[in-house]
Amino acid sequence: MNENLKYKIALTFIPKIGPILAKRLISYCGSAEAVFKEKRWALEKIPGVGSFSANAILNQNVIERAESEIKFIEKNVIHPIFYLDPDYPKRLTYCDDSPVFLYFKGNANMNSEKIISIVGTREATDHGKELCEKLVADLAVHNVIIVSGLAYGIDICAHKAAMDNKLSTICVLAHGLDKIYPGVHASTAQKMLEFGGWLTDFPSKTTPDRENFPSRNRIVAGIADATIVIESKAGGGSLITADIANSYSRDVFAFPGRVGDECSVGCNNLIKQNKAALIQSAADVVYIMGWEQTKNVKAPQQKQLFIELKPEEELVVNVLKEKDSINIDDLCLVCKLPMSKVSSLLLTLEFSGIVRSLPGKMYRLN
């Protein structure tokens, strides 16, 4: 049995210790294994860890549960991912409350160049489904990975549209990988293993309880470059996902709807409150994300002298000064700015001869 893996999983079973405190424990102790071998008095001195948590850490029951989980993982060909592993979704690493441990089954690249989350009401109208299908079909040329939550309505529509257009699609689940919820979507989920996969931070035998869904939504928001809301009532999970995406400084888009339509209230409110950019098509998403913005730009050979930079431009330049080159996705996360904003800043800096674009969405100072 993989001893390292055992302790990594066991850490997630400790009561009252969430991802932020778990990462702090590892930072103080040096590794997941070291956490369980630390002295009680030393654990109690770590900020946020009291006697209750120290006792829970030293309780061997969590180790036994982890050993059982490893057997499930091996039997079902599930890929375990620790937050310090190189294949952990890099976009999640910039979210303070991102999961310490993930369970993945499938073949999608969760560090792909372009990832979009699509969410919406479970009671989608025919119009909403048509919007979703056309959006995904039009995004197919950009080889985007589509993420959603496998729920009724917009979620399942997005997954099916992705597969119809030969795109990878990942469903983020609010339970363990020993089941699929809702059960009626099991056949679609099974097909998704060929086109993408299943992802969760919940171990096996976890039921899809109501309180698990907001936790699931943070992964949906954090793993993508942007979240698109297609139809939403005045309240609901898709609005929670949009709020979380905003808190992560990710782009949020929403399709507007007709005034008075129940399924349009949420989207219209997001737009009205400046929590989402209004979009009418995939072309709007492509433009705002800057996926074609710098395609044919040729930077001047000599940069302007004594140019006065705006604060956000200066922020980008300062990051670039510290690195030979950087991927635009990493630049967004370091600067804590949305992709659309960073793309615009880079374009301005490129026209000024300050920044040069390189193959693979890489940038460096001229």
Image (cartoon, grey):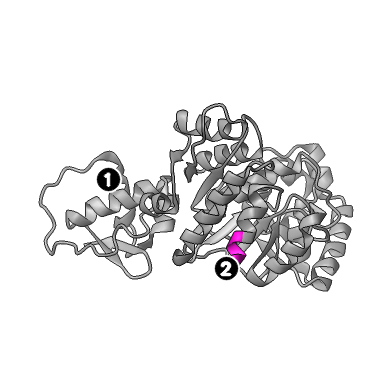
Give x and y (percent) for residue 2: 78, 71
Which residue sits furthest top?
260
Q: Which mark is residue 109?
A: 2
Image vertical order of residue 159 relative to residue 119, above or below: below
Q: Is residue 85 visible?
A: no
Callout 2 secondary element: loop
Q: Which mark is residue 62?
A: none
Query: Magenta span covers which residues?
Result: 161-167
Task: Name the residue type under label 2.
Answer: Asn
Task: Name the residue type under label 1.
Answer: Glu
User: For this view, does 160 lie left or right of residue 339?
Assistant: right
Image quadrant in which the N terminus is located:
bottom right
Callout 1 secondary element: helix
Give x and y (percent) for residue 29: 67, 54
3D distance between C-alphas at marks 1 and 2: 33 Å
Q: Which residue is mark 1?
A: 314
Give x and y (percent) for residue 186: 78, 60
User: For this view, does 6 lie left or right of residue 331?
Assistant: right
Mark 2 nearby-residue class (10 Å; few <14, some 14–19, many ≥20)? some
